[in-house]
Image: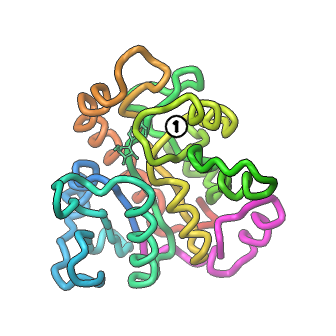
Amino acid sequence: MAPPHDDKAAADFAEDSTHKRPISNILFIIAMQTEALPLVNKFQLAEEPDSVFPKGVPWVRYSGKYKHLHINIVCPGKDATLGVDCVGTVSASLLAYASVQALQPDLIINAGTAGGFKAKGASIGDVFLASDVAFHDRRIPIPVFDLFGVGSRKTLSTPNLAKELNLKVGKLSTGDSLDMCPQDEAAILANDATVKDMEGAAIAYVAHLLNVPVIFLKAVTDVVDGDKPTAEEFLQNLNAVAIALDLAATKVVDFINGKSCSEL
Ligand code: FMC
Protein backbone atom coordinates (compact mmCIF):
# COMPACT_ATOMS: atom_id res chain seq x y z
CA MET A 1 0.00 0.00 0.00
CA ALA A 2 1.09 3.54 -0.66
CA PRO A 3 3.07 5.80 1.62
CA PRO A 4 0.23 7.68 3.31
CA HIS A 5 -0.90 11.17 2.30
CA ASP A 6 -2.79 12.03 5.47
CA ASP A 7 -3.73 10.71 8.90
CA LYS A 8 -6.56 8.50 7.68
CA ALA A 9 -4.39 6.98 4.96
CA ALA A 10 -1.61 6.49 7.52
CA ALA A 11 -4.03 4.60 9.80
CA ASP A 12 -5.25 2.44 6.89
CA PHE A 13 -1.65 1.80 5.91
CA ALA A 14 -0.75 0.61 9.42
CA GLU A 15 -3.69 -1.81 9.28
CA ASP A 16 -2.67 -3.28 5.95
CA SER A 17 -1.36 -6.85 6.27
CA THR A 18 1.56 -6.40 3.86
CA HIS A 19 2.69 -3.64 6.17
CA LYS A 20 2.94 -6.16 9.02
CA ARG A 21 4.90 -8.82 7.12
CA PRO A 22 8.67 -8.94 7.75
CA ILE A 23 10.53 -6.99 5.10
CA SER A 24 12.54 -9.34 2.91
CA ASN A 25 13.30 -7.40 -0.26
CA ILE A 26 14.85 -3.92 -0.15
CA LEU A 27 15.48 -1.70 -3.15
CA PHE A 28 18.02 1.09 -2.77
CA ILE A 29 17.81 3.80 -5.40
CA ILE A 30 21.05 5.80 -5.42
CA ALA A 31 21.76 8.53 -7.97
CA MET A 32 25.56 8.58 -7.97
CA GLN A 33 27.96 5.66 -8.19
CA THR A 34 30.26 7.35 -5.63
CA GLU A 35 27.38 7.21 -3.15
CA ALA A 36 26.51 3.59 -3.98
CA LEU A 37 29.86 1.79 -4.13
CA PRO A 38 30.77 1.74 -0.41
CA LEU A 39 27.36 0.18 0.27
CA VAL A 40 27.74 -2.33 -2.58
CA ASN A 41 31.03 -3.42 -0.98
CA LYS A 42 29.65 -3.47 2.56
CA PHE A 43 26.76 -5.78 1.59
CA GLN A 44 29.03 -7.74 -0.76
CA LEU A 45 26.62 -7.30 -3.63
CA ALA A 46 27.47 -8.33 -7.19
CA GLU A 47 26.77 -6.34 -10.31
CA GLU A 48 24.10 -8.19 -12.28
CA PRO A 49 25.05 -8.55 -15.95
CA ASP A 50 21.72 -10.25 -16.81
CA SER A 51 19.98 -6.95 -16.46
CA VAL A 52 16.27 -6.86 -15.80
CA PHE A 53 16.33 -3.49 -17.54
CA PRO A 54 15.75 -2.72 -21.21
CA LYS A 55 18.76 -3.33 -23.46
CA GLY A 56 21.02 -0.33 -23.87
CA VAL A 57 20.03 1.73 -20.81
CA PRO A 58 22.93 2.85 -18.59
CA TRP A 59 21.16 1.73 -15.39
CA VAL A 60 23.21 -0.48 -13.09
CA ARG A 61 21.96 -3.09 -10.62
CA TYR A 62 23.87 -4.74 -7.81
CA SER A 63 22.22 -7.50 -5.80
CA GLY A 64 22.78 -10.08 -3.12
CA LYS A 65 21.75 -11.37 0.25
CA TYR A 66 22.62 -9.65 3.52
CA LYS A 67 21.41 -11.22 6.77
CA HIS A 68 17.74 -12.16 6.06
CA LEU A 69 17.34 -9.59 3.33
CA HIS A 70 17.51 -9.56 -0.44
CA ILE A 71 19.11 -6.26 -1.33
CA ASN A 72 19.17 -4.58 -4.71
CA ILE A 73 21.00 -1.31 -5.25
CA VAL A 74 20.15 0.43 -8.51
CA CYS A 75 21.85 3.48 -9.97
CA PRO A 76 20.89 5.43 -13.10
CA GLY A 77 24.47 4.99 -14.34
CA LYS A 78 26.54 7.23 -16.56
CA ASP A 79 25.23 9.32 -19.42
CA ALA A 80 26.34 7.59 -22.63
CA THR A 81 27.67 10.80 -24.18
CA LEU A 82 28.93 12.82 -21.22
CA GLY A 83 30.06 10.07 -18.87
CA VAL A 84 28.59 11.62 -15.71
CA ASP A 85 25.98 10.14 -13.36
CA CYS A 86 22.40 10.64 -14.60
CA VAL A 87 21.26 12.67 -11.59
CA GLY A 88 17.84 14.29 -11.33
CA THR A 89 14.15 13.45 -11.42
CA VAL A 90 13.78 12.08 -14.96
CA SER A 91 16.29 9.24 -14.64
CA ALA A 92 15.26 8.60 -11.03
CA SER A 93 11.58 8.19 -11.99
CA LEU A 94 12.28 5.86 -14.90
CA LEU A 95 14.69 3.78 -12.87
CA ALA A 96 12.30 3.59 -9.90
CA TYR A 97 9.44 2.49 -12.15
CA ALA A 98 11.43 -0.18 -13.98
CA SER A 99 13.06 -1.46 -10.77
CA VAL A 100 9.80 -1.81 -8.86
CA GLN A 101 8.17 -3.59 -11.79
CA ALA A 102 11.06 -6.02 -12.13
CA LEU A 103 12.07 -6.56 -8.51
CA GLN A 104 8.81 -6.13 -6.52
CA PRO A 105 10.49 -4.68 -3.40
CA ASP A 106 8.81 -4.53 0.04
CA LEU A 107 10.54 -1.23 0.74
CA ILE A 108 12.41 1.41 -1.25
CA ILE A 109 15.25 3.38 0.31
CA ASN A 110 16.37 6.45 -1.61
CA ALA A 111 19.82 7.19 -0.22
CA GLY A 112 21.89 10.11 -1.42
CA THR A 113 23.52 13.41 -0.73
CA ALA A 114 21.69 16.68 -0.28
CA GLY A 115 22.11 20.33 0.43
CA GLY A 116 21.18 21.30 4.00
CA PHE A 117 19.92 24.51 5.57
CA LYS A 118 21.85 25.55 8.64
CA ALA A 119 18.93 27.77 9.67
CA LYS A 120 16.95 24.52 10.06
CA GLY A 121 19.71 22.72 11.98
CA ALA A 122 21.63 20.96 9.19
CA SER A 123 25.44 20.61 9.14
CA ILE A 124 27.88 18.90 6.77
CA GLY A 125 27.86 15.12 7.27
CA ASP A 126 24.46 14.99 9.03
CA VAL A 127 22.23 12.18 7.81
CA PHE A 128 18.53 13.01 7.68
CA LEU A 129 15.45 10.85 7.44
CA ALA A 130 12.83 12.75 5.42
CA SER A 131 9.41 13.01 7.06
CA ASP A 132 7.87 14.72 4.00
CA VAL A 133 8.89 15.36 0.41
CA ALA A 134 7.79 17.99 -2.12
CA PHE A 135 9.00 19.66 -5.31
CA HIS A 136 10.26 23.24 -5.41
CA ASP A 137 10.64 23.83 -9.17
CA ARG A 138 7.24 22.87 -10.56
CA ARG A 139 5.47 26.23 -10.57
CA ILE A 140 1.94 26.05 -12.02
CA PRO A 141 0.06 29.15 -10.82
CA ILE A 142 -3.43 27.80 -11.52
CA PRO A 143 -5.63 26.66 -8.63
CA VAL A 144 -5.15 22.98 -7.75
CA PHE A 145 -2.48 22.54 -10.47
CA ASP A 146 -0.30 24.54 -8.09
CA LEU A 147 -0.72 21.81 -5.46
CA PHE A 148 -0.10 19.09 -8.03
CA GLY A 149 3.14 20.83 -8.98
CA VAL A 150 4.36 20.94 -5.38
CA GLY A 151 3.45 17.24 -5.04
CA SER A 152 3.80 17.19 -1.28
CA ARG A 153 3.72 13.75 0.37
CA LYS A 154 4.36 12.20 3.74
CA THR A 155 6.91 9.40 3.73
CA LEU A 156 6.52 6.10 5.58
CA SER A 157 6.44 6.90 9.29
CA THR A 158 9.57 5.42 10.95
CA PRO A 159 9.66 6.77 14.53
CA ASN A 160 11.51 3.75 15.97
CA LEU A 161 14.17 3.87 13.29
CA ALA A 162 14.78 7.59 13.81
CA LYS A 163 14.96 7.17 17.58
CA GLU A 164 17.08 4.03 17.71
CA LEU A 165 19.65 5.34 15.22
CA ASN A 166 19.49 8.89 16.49
CA LEU A 167 18.87 10.24 12.99
CA LYS A 168 17.79 13.79 12.39
CA VAL A 169 14.34 14.10 10.81
CA GLY A 170 13.42 16.90 8.41
CA LYS A 171 11.45 17.74 5.29
CA LEU A 172 13.05 17.20 1.88
CA SER A 173 12.50 19.45 -1.13
CA THR A 174 13.37 18.26 -4.66
CA GLY A 175 14.21 20.11 -7.85
CA ASP A 176 16.27 19.47 -10.98
CA SER A 177 18.99 22.04 -10.21
CA LEU A 178 21.96 21.87 -7.87
CA ASP A 179 21.88 25.62 -7.38
CA MET A 180 18.96 27.64 -6.08
CA CYS A 181 17.28 30.58 -7.84
CA PRO A 182 15.11 33.02 -5.82
CA GLN A 183 11.85 31.28 -6.91
CA ASP A 184 13.20 27.92 -5.78
CA GLU A 185 14.32 29.45 -2.51
CA ALA A 186 10.81 30.80 -1.83
CA ALA A 187 9.27 27.41 -2.64
CA ILE A 188 11.77 25.56 -0.44
CA LEU A 189 10.88 27.92 2.39
CA ALA A 190 7.16 27.29 1.75
CA ASN A 191 7.90 23.54 1.82
CA ASP A 192 9.55 24.09 5.23
CA ALA A 193 12.47 21.97 4.02
CA THR A 194 15.67 21.21 5.90
CA VAL A 195 17.33 19.36 3.02
CA LYS A 196 17.17 19.70 -0.77
CA ASP A 197 18.03 17.12 -3.41
CA MET A 198 17.37 16.27 -7.06
CA GLU A 199 15.48 12.94 -6.89
CA GLY A 200 13.47 12.39 -3.69
CA ALA A 201 9.99 13.70 -4.52
CA ALA A 202 10.10 12.04 -7.95
CA ILE A 203 10.85 8.66 -6.38
CA ALA A 204 8.06 9.27 -3.84
CA TYR A 205 5.66 9.86 -6.74
CA VAL A 206 6.56 6.55 -8.40
CA ALA A 207 6.47 4.68 -5.08
CA HIS A 208 2.99 6.06 -4.47
CA LEU A 209 1.81 5.11 -7.96
CA LEU A 210 3.02 1.54 -7.47
CA ASN A 211 2.03 1.22 -3.78
CA VAL A 212 5.49 0.66 -2.34
CA PRO A 213 6.59 2.22 0.97
CA VAL A 214 9.62 4.46 0.67
CA ILE A 215 12.06 6.12 3.05
CA PHE A 216 14.69 8.76 2.32
CA LEU A 217 18.17 8.93 3.80
CA LYS A 218 19.91 12.16 2.87
CA ALA A 219 23.46 13.11 3.89
CA VAL A 220 24.43 16.77 3.78
CA THR A 221 27.32 17.61 1.41
CA ASP A 222 26.79 21.38 1.31
CA VAL A 223 25.21 24.11 3.37
CA VAL A 224 22.84 25.95 1.07
CA ASP A 225 22.48 29.02 3.30
CA GLY A 226 26.22 29.13 4.06
CA ASP A 227 28.91 31.25 2.41
CA LYS A 228 30.62 28.63 0.19
CA PRO A 229 29.63 28.11 -3.48
CA THR A 230 27.39 25.01 -3.60
CA ALA A 231 29.12 23.15 -6.44
CA GLU A 232 32.56 23.60 -4.88
CA GLU A 233 31.41 22.53 -1.41
CA PHE A 234 29.47 19.57 -2.86
CA LEU A 235 32.51 18.23 -4.76
CA GLN A 236 34.83 18.84 -1.83
CA ASN A 237 32.67 16.84 0.61
CA LEU A 238 31.19 14.18 -1.67
CA ASN A 239 33.59 11.31 -0.86
CA ALA A 240 33.65 11.83 2.91
CA VAL A 241 29.89 12.32 3.13
CA ALA A 242 29.28 9.23 0.96
CA ILE A 243 31.06 7.25 3.69
CA ALA A 244 28.85 8.80 6.41
CA LEU A 245 25.80 8.01 4.29
CA ASP A 246 26.83 4.42 3.81
CA LEU A 247 27.51 3.95 7.54
CA ALA A 248 24.03 5.25 8.30
CA ALA A 249 22.47 3.14 5.54
CA THR A 250 24.13 0.01 6.95
CA LYS A 251 22.72 0.76 10.41
CA VAL A 252 19.30 1.31 8.85
CA VAL A 253 19.46 -2.06 7.07
CA ASP A 254 20.63 -3.80 10.28
CA PHE A 255 17.68 -2.23 12.09
CA ILE A 256 15.21 -3.25 9.36
CA ASN A 257 16.45 -6.87 9.29
CA GLY A 258 13.68 -9.07 10.75
CA LYS A 259 11.15 -6.23 11.08
CA SER A 260 8.00 -5.26 9.21
CA CYS A 261 7.24 -1.75 7.93
CA SER A 262 4.85 -1.16 10.82
CA GLU A 263 7.70 -1.80 13.30
CA LEU A 264 9.90 0.89 11.79
N1 FMC B 1 20.98 20.69 -4.10
C1 FMC B 1 20.40 19.71 -4.82
N2 FMC B 1 20.88 18.44 -4.87
C2 FMC B 1 21.97 18.13 -4.15
C3 FMC B 1 22.60 19.13 -3.37
C4 FMC B 1 22.06 20.46 -3.36
N3 FMC B 1 22.61 21.44 -2.67
N4 FMC B 1 23.66 18.53 -2.79
N5 FMC B 1 23.70 17.23 -3.18
C5 FMC B 1 22.69 16.96 -4.00
C6 FMC B 1 22.44 15.61 -4.63
C7 FMC B 1 21.41 15.52 -5.75
O1 FMC B 1 20.30 14.75 -5.31
C8 FMC B 1 22.14 14.86 -6.91
O2 FMC B 1 21.94 13.46 -6.95
C9 FMC B 1 23.61 15.15 -6.63
O3 FMC B 1 23.70 15.23 -5.22
C10 FMC B 1 24.07 16.45 -7.20
O4 FMC B 1 24.08 16.51 -8.58
Q: Is residue 163 visible?
A: no
The answer to whether 176 is drawn above or below residue 81 in the figure is: above
Q: Callout 1 environment at 10 Å: few (<14), some (14 to 19), or many (20+)?
A: many
Which residue sits at x=50%, y=27%? 122
Looking at the image, the residue that sits furthest to the top is 227
Q: Which residues are magenta?
A: 1-26
70 vs 123, nearest the viewer: 123
In screen coordinates, is 131 left or right of 252?
right
Picture residue at 24% right of the left edge, 62% below the top: 77
Q: Helix, strand or loop at disc 1?
A: strand
Using the rendered image of the protein, determine whether residue 157 is visible from the camera's viewpoint. Answer: yes
Q: Quadrant of residue 157?
A: bottom right
What residue is at 22 percent from the left and 60 percent from the top?
A: 79
Q: Nearer the viewer, residue 164 or 124?
A: 124
Image x and y of residue 226, in percent? 45, 17
Q: Is 211 covered by the magenta stretch?
A: no
Residue 134 x %, y %: 62, 49
- Amino acid carrying label 1: it is Val
Count of all numbered marks drawn on residues in the image: 1
- Left or right placement of residue 107 versus residue 159 in this view: left
In the rendered image, which quarter is residue 11 located in? bottom right
- Asked if 225 appears above or below 74 in the picture, the reply is above
Residue 88, percent from left and from top: 40, 53
Q: Which residue lies under the disc numbered 1?
A: 195
Judged from the image, the quadrant occupied by ligand 1 is: top left
Residue 4 magenta: yes
Image location of residue 114, percent across then percent down: 42, 39
Q: Relative to residue 199, is residue 91 depicted above or below?
A: below
Task: Identify the image quadrant of the C terminus.
Answer: bottom right
